[in-house]
Image (cartoon, rainbow, N blue to C red):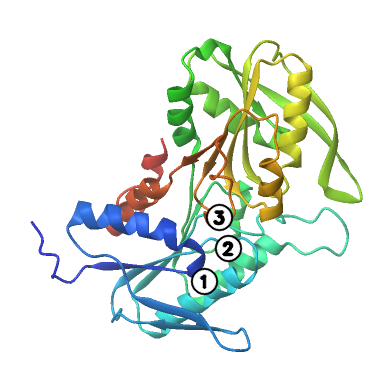
Amino acid sequence: MNDKNMECPFLIFSGRNSQTLSQKICDYLNKKLNFNVCGEINCENFSDGEIRVQIKNNVRGKEVFVIQSTNSPADNLLELLVIIDALKRASAEKITAIIPYFGYARQDRKTHGREPITAKLMANLIETAGANRVVCVDLHAGQIQGFFNIPMDDLKTVKLFAEQIKKDFTNFENIVVASPDAGGAKRAEKLASYMPGSSWVICYKNRHHDDKDNVSDFKILGEVKNKDVIIIDDVTSTFSTIKGSATEILNQGAKTVSAGIAHWACPNEITDKLKQGTNITTIYVTNTCPRSSYPISLNIAKEIDVSQLISETILRIVNHDSVSSLLE
């Protein structure tokens, strides 16, 4: 048995945007290892708003992990970069950036002339700051892994969603998993595979050319009549796609509609609107984004905790074990 006063071989630091999730991860690892893995860090703002960071621990020659989601505002990303730079200048041996929600991931390619590929820019910034490895949760686009020239792991939450849904539904044959677009078809198929007898469908949507946040003209490719439908998506910032899909699914005779969302990137006003009523029976949402931003306060919302998944990933990285086998 290890002594908690002994020096831990690695340390975990958190930006201000992911403190609640980071504390859960530290609590899990502290209990499992009988070590205190929590690093001390001071993050604050100068009077003009600029970010100041100071690492309180000696990290020379140590393996360190930095946890910070980079959802809006952009200061969350900048704070992550500043923390990585501080650790690099403090002579940390290896720096792993754990980014539960990788912001700007939806800008992964050019769709019109004179547009940036912002996801690639984010990868460049993180590498330049000094990260040696990156871990994300449910990347919006898998090809973003190729934007990095360092090891990059994309953790999947579909199994976690399945475990919770199986507690809430007993008749799997009446479950239909719906993808809100063709790009999420594999995710929907994977979720359905955890529930023998269930099926999956695709919601086809047309976006307004002048407003990418709003969607119209939904069509359902598959049968949903008298079914319990679960819409599964990786991220929502307006809830309009989920809402529109749910409306069309109910119009086609579905019994109930629930939603599973990996990253709740909606502003607070969207959450406030949901409190006024929605046609969604249950919203399953992970805690990759700060608790203040997602609708866990609603009585229809259920939290899917990713802290153990990330904790076990950290252990595998430290022990040089396979991370991909954790996802199988």
Residue 22 locus on image (x, y percent): 40, 60
- Residue on which the image places disc 1: 80
Tell me the tag on residue 101: 3
Q: Quadrant of the N terminus?
A: bottom left
What secondary structure is found at the residue carrying circle 1?
A: helix
Tell me the tag on residue 70: 2
Say whether residue 132 is left or right of residue 145: left
The residue lying toward the viewer, choosing from 154 and 76, is: 76
The residue lying toward the viewer, choosing from 315 and 171, is: 171
Say whether residue 10 is left or right of residue 75: left
Amino acid type at circle 3 is: Tyr
Dot 1 or dot 2, earlier in sequence: 2
Q: Are marks 3 and 1 in contact (CB under 8 Å)?
A: no
Identified at 47% across, 23% down, the residue is 168
Q: Are marks 3 and 2 in contact (CB under 8 Å)?
A: yes
**Label 3 to label 2: alpha-carbon separation:** 6 Å
Residue 230 locus on image (x, y percent): 61, 26
Identified at 92% across, 51% down, the residue is 210
Judged from this view, the residue extending furthest toward the left is: 1
Q: Is residue 196 above or below residue 78?
A: above
